Amino acid sequence: MSRTIPFVILAAAFFMGAAAHAQSTFPLHPIKILTGFPAGSATDVAARALSGPMAQQLGQPVIIENRTGAASNIAAAAVAAAPADGYTVFVATIANTINAAFPGSHSVDLVSAFTPIMMIGSVPNVLVANPALHLRSLDDLIRLAKAQPGKLTYASSGIGTSPHLSGVLFSTLTGVQMSHVPYRGSTPAVTDLLSGQVQIMFSPASSVLQYIRAHRLDALAVTSARRASVLPDLPTIDELGLKGFETSVWYGLVVPVGTPREPIERIAMATRFSLASNEVQSLFKAQGIEIVDAGAEEFARYLRSEASKWSAVIREADIHPE
């Protein structure tokens, strides 16, 4: 689904949007973008990088507000309850589709509560192992896990997170049994992985790139549908035989359902303008974020697909939130 945006397309979108700007009545005052994660997180960094060029294009300030808690559901609920006028935007992530996928969940449903604007990026998870295991391939890992059922430990940033569910999906498709060790965030999980307290992890690329490059972790595969630009020589899990395996930490902009078309189109145009800037492209690359070309309709299809996939994974594995 994900495709890197050619610069000429982004540039063309900018000039077309600029011509329409003179006739637009939106925005008349500042726009607020809510993220459900703290300052300094990848979601926050991405939103703040976009906000400057977006404000330049829209002619109004774009304010980033961190509304943390409940795996970003507090921010999602706040935006869902806001007026549907385009002035309150939410940075949706995979966490929101996972939240709503748990049976009996009271989390905000992205599919029914919001109208998508566009995706802005995606960070693949990377399957990494402590070098003490001496793994050189995905097949090595599968053989080891099958030889020692339940003894191989994999870390995650918490129950129900993308790294956790990547491990669950992997176990389901390969038939291996591994022991899940949840942490409160990626940093302590990666720390224990480096020290050998746990053995493998499906980690967001941004959290482990430096350790892969320093040969402190062995990278076996990426979990995205396509190879990651930051690790172009690393194969995908799909390539290695687990067809259809895809997980990534994605980001996209949504607004409350019922928002008129004009604000959605203006925000999308300003976002593409921002994504075309050298500054944003450099920052995203440094964070391991792949820029994604997915407009409102394609993003809506992707959200439905993600909701369906993770509901099935959670149900079949009988996973319950913390």
Image (cartoon, rainbow, N blue to C red):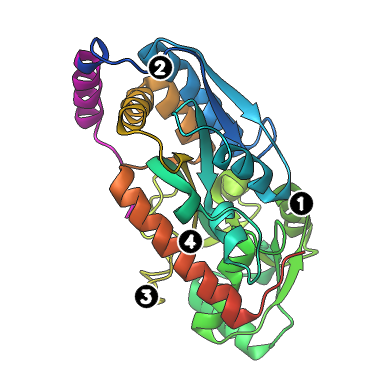
Which amino acid type is shown beneath numbered disc 3?
Answer: Lys
> Dots 3 and 4: beta carbons under 8 Å?
no
Mark 3 or mark 2, earlier in chain: 2
- For numbered disc 3, what is the local secondary structure? loop
Which amino acid type is shown beneath numbered disc 1?
Answer: Thr
- Where residue 32 sits: x, y (%)? 55, 24
Can you tell which mark lies on residue 60?
Answer: none
Comparing labels 2 and 4, the label whose residue is closer to the camera: 2
Badge 4 is on which residue?
247
Distance, label 2 to label 4, CA atoms, is 35 Å
Determine which quarter of the picture holds residue 225: bottom left
- Where residue 122 sits: x, y (%)? 45, 46
Q: Name the residue rendered at 61%, 51% in the picture.
A: 215
Distance, label 1 to label 4, CA atoms, is 22 Å
Q: Name the residue rendered at 35%, 69% in the picture.
A: 239
Mark 2 or mark 4, earlier in chain: 2
- For numbered disc 2, what is the local secondary structure? loop
Does the stretch in magenta take in 213?
A: no
Q: Name the residue rendered at 38%, 15% in the picture.
A: 58
Distance, label 2 to label 1, CA atoms, is 45 Å
Mark 1 or mark 3, earlier in chain: 1
Badge 2 is on which residue?
27
Determine which quarter of the picture holds residue 143: bottom right
Comparing labels 1 and 4, the label whose residue is closer to the camera: 4
Main secondary structure of the magenta stretch: helix
